[in-house]
Each structure stands twice: as C-alpha cells, then as structure tokens.
Image (tube, rainbow, N blue to C red):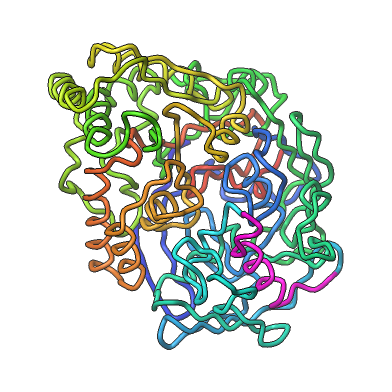
C-alpha cells in the first residue's frame, strides 16, 4: 500500500490558507465501509505532562489532545485546511482579523464561546503560568517575541471577545498565513471548568480534560494506556468512524510490533528498525509507506562546557561532518529515512534547495577531524561526547549507537550513548534544563509550513528551543518572513537557514519517511501529512 501523491500548492487567502500534501492510505477509500463499534488500539507513549493544551508540546500527549479538541480550523489527511469551530476568518489587511464562531459545545454541555479561546490564549501567554506553548502567542499584539504578555499586562491585547460568537484579533505585523496555524493545539479553546477560582488550570482537569473534539477521555491509567470514546455530540469534520481509540503506552517498540503481528495492537505509527527490512512482505500485518515530513536532529546546548562561541561552532560542524547520514539511513533504517538537506522538509511550499552552508551536512571525516583540532586549539576537549536518547522511540537506540560510533572513530575521541527508558523521562530533563549532554531531538510539524520548522525551534525564547539558542538576526528574519508571501517568504526563510548552518543550534540528521503498519483486518487506515495515522478513520 503506497503513498498517494497530490500536487503541492500553497494558497494564502483572506479566510483560510491551505496546502495540499501527500497522504498514505489503504487501497479502499470507504473508510472501512462506514462506522463501527469496534475500539481501535494504537501505539502510544506516556505523556510528558498533564493533558493541558497550553502546556503540551510532545507527541505522546499531543496525539491524545488532538482527538479531544477541535480548533478554529482543522486539517485533512493531505494538509488541506477547513473551518471547524470557526464560521469564518476574515481580514482586509492580514493584520486585523475577525473570527466568527459556529454553535459548538464542550463535552460538559457548556458552550464554546469567543471567551473560551481568548481565555486559553491569555493563559498560555501569561508568564506566571510558565506554559510550554507560550511561544505560539507571539503574533498577537501585546506580547513579547517569546509570546508572553508584555510587562504589567494581565490581558492579551491582540485577542478580544467582542461577543459570544466573535473574536477580534490584532497582530503585531501583517501575516497572510496566520489562519493556517489555528488548527494547532496551542490555539484550542478551554472551558470554564478548566480553571480554579484563582484562574489556574487545575490538576484534576489535566488528568481528565473536557474538550470539544471527536473523542472524550474515558480513563488514563498512567504508564499503561489512555482510553478515548467517541463524542456523540461532535458535528465537525473529524467524526469518529470507530467505537473509540485506546493508546497503549509502550517502552519497547519491538514489543509493539509483536503485538501488531499477534492482533493485539491495531495501528503502529512507526515500525522499529528490527522489522523494517521485512515488514512490507510480512503477511501478518498491513504495511504503509510514503514520503513524510518529520525531522530528526541532535541538540548540544551552548550552556555546556566547550560548546559556546567560536569553539562551539567548530565542534558542532566537526560532529556534523563526522556523521555518515547515508550509511545510517540505509543500514539502520532500511531507507525509511532520507538524509537531511536543510532544517525543514522538501514537501512543503517554499522549500529552497542548496542553501549556502548546507555542505556542513556532507560526510567528510578528514575535514571533521581538522575542525575538531581547531576547536581544541581554543580549549582542549576532555571527557566523552555523549548523546542521550529515549529507548521507547522506534530505532533511537540503534541509530544513536551508530552515530556515536561514527563520531568517536572519525574524530578520534570517546563518544557514547546514554539511554533513558521513556520519552517522558528524557523530556523532563530537557525541559527543566537539567540535562548535561547532547540529546536527540525531532520535529513533527504543527501546521504545514516551512516556517513552523524554524520559528518554534530557533526563535529566541521559543517553547521548543531546547538549546536556548538566540540570534537577533534570525529573530529579525523570522519576523520578516511572517509578513511575506510566496517567493519573498521563501527567500527570508532560506536566509534564516543560512545562519543556522553557521551556528548549528541543532545538527540536522534526516527526514523520516512513513513506515507504519496496521494489523490484519483493520481498515480505513490513512497516514496524514504529519506522518501519523488519522485515528478517527480507522475501523475493524
């Protein structure tokens, strides 16, 4: 079952911008012949934090939240955007936007109003709340470049509830693509029940959130599973075709594949390396392959000794050139990964080929050793180069071990992996800035845009800027890119990447192709533009 390609297009309009991307699906287009009462089981990982939209920026929790909530817009499997809770999103100048809402309810029966969105956005932006999704509020007037409220402010100047059905948005600058981002979880609404008397989101709500999307959280047994059941009152574009989705939390991807083969798991987002060579011919499962947009990298924070200033730049370039990406993607991933050419993906409109400086991604052991020696002339490196990873992610152990072996051999230094049992454990160390080594990082786009691979990861103070990278010129160009369209925007984003290739705040590794699977008898499986299953369509 192969990728079904669609034409790539990027269209910015006064209401909603849309892009058409590739999706991967079975040969049947009837979604399993209609709705069924069967509950679908899917691979998952324990969420890093409580299930709060404004504070969840990782896949384990994000997959659940995306089924519990509906945003102003939604994306279909190919990345096409349509209005969902929004009746209309309009602007005459791309700076002042009027958003009209449809009649909609949360699962506790309370209405979704303009205030439901504005209150959630304000909570995310308030620095006192320390929300990981704060960065996504940066377009609104009255916020800093980090997305937090300007000093002394208690309300979000750029978002006002005019009445129950109308939101008036004022941006700092004109942004033609602003509507395109509004299907991302950072912009979901929250009900009054989320907040206590002091205005804080309660722990009880995070344990069992009240959403407005196609599913309701039935139970969450930590480290085991989360059970979601259909929301019978949901009338949006992602209506459940099944009787529910249960995410089973695994710490060993190989166990998940074994469960799939045995019929004890229905959908697996990514096949582990141990099965990649034969999964397409495995008669016990259904295989899905195709182009994907997920990005993998390693991050080495500048705060670590030997990794700041000119010395740090030389060492990062040396590490990058010491990595034979083609060898790892072929031997470990059986071609299911493609060596990175930049910091983004070639699948989205605005992709620019051969950005100056991208040659730092080319394998060259001799040049790598030379760069490392130049760094040693500044300050001699002692100890080992260590890369941390989470063992519950498919292939992480294998590729990190291969990467550090290459680095150690090609630079003539000690290099070693450091495994953590779960993604949650690793992310807590990263988020709290307690990690003392390099670590694996990756990105699954929030909305279909090249900008989304750059701003949230490398903008100063951005919520997913794990290495705390800061460059005023990058921030300036990112801001200018938001106000541009078409070729001009692509040019600005290419200039951003040219600087990133010099600084290497993260070292690009590869883009992940779709290599997923479903159990025999499961129907309606579609892999989206994000490279993950459209869970609401799956039946059996």
Residue lying at the far front in this picture: please name it.
379
Chief secondary structure of the magenta span? helix
Q: Quadrant of the C terminus?
A: top right
Above or below — where is 515 with respect to 98?
above
Residue 87: x percent and y percent?
62, 79
**Left/right of residue 317 with respect to residue 80 in the rendered view:** left
For the residue pair 361 and 265, the one nearer the viewer reads as 361
At 84% from the left edge and 65% from the top edge, which residue is drawn? 197
At 52% from the left edge and 53% from the top edge, which residue is drawn? 77
**Left/right of residue 20 with respect to residue 352 in the rendered view:** right
Residue 138 in sight in this render: yes
For the residue pair 307 and 465, the one nearer the viewer reads as 307
At 52% from the left edge and 75% from the top edge, which residue is drawn? 142
- In the image, the segment drawn in magenta is 110-130
**Left/right of residue 534 with respect to residue 302 in the rendered view:** right
Residue 29: x percent and y percent?
57, 50
Residue 171: x percent and y percent?
47, 77
For the residue pair 491 and 36, the one nearer the viewer reads as 491
Residue 183: x percent and y percent?
56, 62
Above or below — where is 12 with respect to 364?
below
Question: Is 96 part of what is drawn in magenta?
Answer: no
């Amino acid at each position: 079952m192969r990728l079904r390609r669609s034409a790539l297009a990027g269209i910015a309009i006064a209401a909603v911008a849309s892009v058409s991307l590739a999706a991967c699906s079975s040969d049947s287009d009837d979604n399993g012949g209609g709705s069924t009462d069967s509950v679908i089981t899917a691979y998952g990982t324990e969420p890093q934090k409580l299930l709060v939209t404004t504070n969840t920026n990782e896949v384990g929790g994000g997959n659940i939240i995306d089924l519990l909530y509906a945003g102003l817009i939604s994306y279909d499997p190919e990345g096409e955007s349509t209005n969902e809770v929004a009746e209309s999103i309009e602007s005459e100048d791309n700076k002042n936007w009027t958003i009209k809402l449809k009649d909609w309810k949360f699962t506790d029966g309370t209405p979704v109003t303009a205030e439901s969105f504005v209150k959630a956005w304000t909570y995310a932006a308030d620095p006192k709340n320390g929300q990981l999704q704060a960065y996504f509020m940066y377009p609104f007037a009255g916020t800093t470049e980090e997305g937090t409220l300007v000093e002394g402010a208690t309300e979000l100047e750029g978002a006002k509830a005019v009445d129950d059905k109308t939101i008036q948005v004022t941006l700092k600058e004109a942004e033609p693509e602003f509507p395109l981002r509004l299907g991302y979880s950072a912009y979901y609404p929250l009900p009054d029940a989320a907040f206590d008397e002091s205005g804080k989101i309660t722990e009880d709500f995070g344990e069992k959130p009240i959403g407005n999307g196609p599913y309701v959280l039935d139970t969450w047994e930590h480290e085991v599973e989360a059970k979601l059941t259909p929301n019978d009152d949901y009338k949006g574009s992602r209506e459940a075709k099944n009787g529910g989705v249960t995410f089973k939390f695994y710490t060993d991807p190989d166990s998940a594949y074994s469960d799939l083969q045995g019929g004890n798991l229905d959908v697996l987002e990514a096949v582990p390396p141990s099965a990649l060579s034969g999964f397409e011919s495995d008669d016990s499962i259904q295989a899905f392959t195709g182009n994907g947009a997920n990005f993998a990298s390693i991050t080495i924070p500048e705060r670590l000794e030997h990794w700041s200033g000119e010395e740090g730049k030389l060492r990062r370039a040396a590490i990058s050139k010491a990595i034979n990406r083609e060898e790892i993607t072929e031997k470990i991933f059986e071609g299911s990964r493609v060596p990175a050419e930049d910091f983004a993906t070639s699948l989205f409109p605005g992709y620019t080929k051969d950005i100056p400086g991208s040659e730092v991604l080319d394998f060259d052991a001799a040049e790598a050793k030379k760069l490392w020696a130049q760094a040693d002339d500044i300050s001699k490196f002692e100890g080992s180069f260590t890369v941390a990873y989470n063992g519950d992610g498919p292939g992480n152990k294998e590729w990190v071990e291969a990467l550090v072996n290459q680095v150690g051999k090609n630079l003539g230094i000690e290099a070693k992996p450091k495994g953590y049992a779960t993604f949650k454990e690793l992310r807590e160390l990263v988020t709290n800035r307690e990690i003392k080594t390099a670590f694996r990082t990756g990105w699954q786009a929030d909305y279909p845009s090249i900008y989304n691979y750059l701003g949230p990861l490398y903008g100063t103070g951005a919520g997913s800027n794990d290495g705390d990278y800061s460059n005023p010129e990058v921030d300036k160009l990112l801001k200018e890119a938001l106000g541009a369209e078409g070729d001009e925007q692509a040019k600005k984003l290419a200039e951003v990447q040219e600087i990133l290739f010099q600084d290497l705040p993260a070292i690009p590794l590869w883009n992940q192709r779709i290599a997923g699977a479903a159990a025999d008898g499961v129907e309606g499986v579609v892999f989206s533009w994000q490279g993950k299953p459209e869970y609401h369509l799956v039946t059996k």
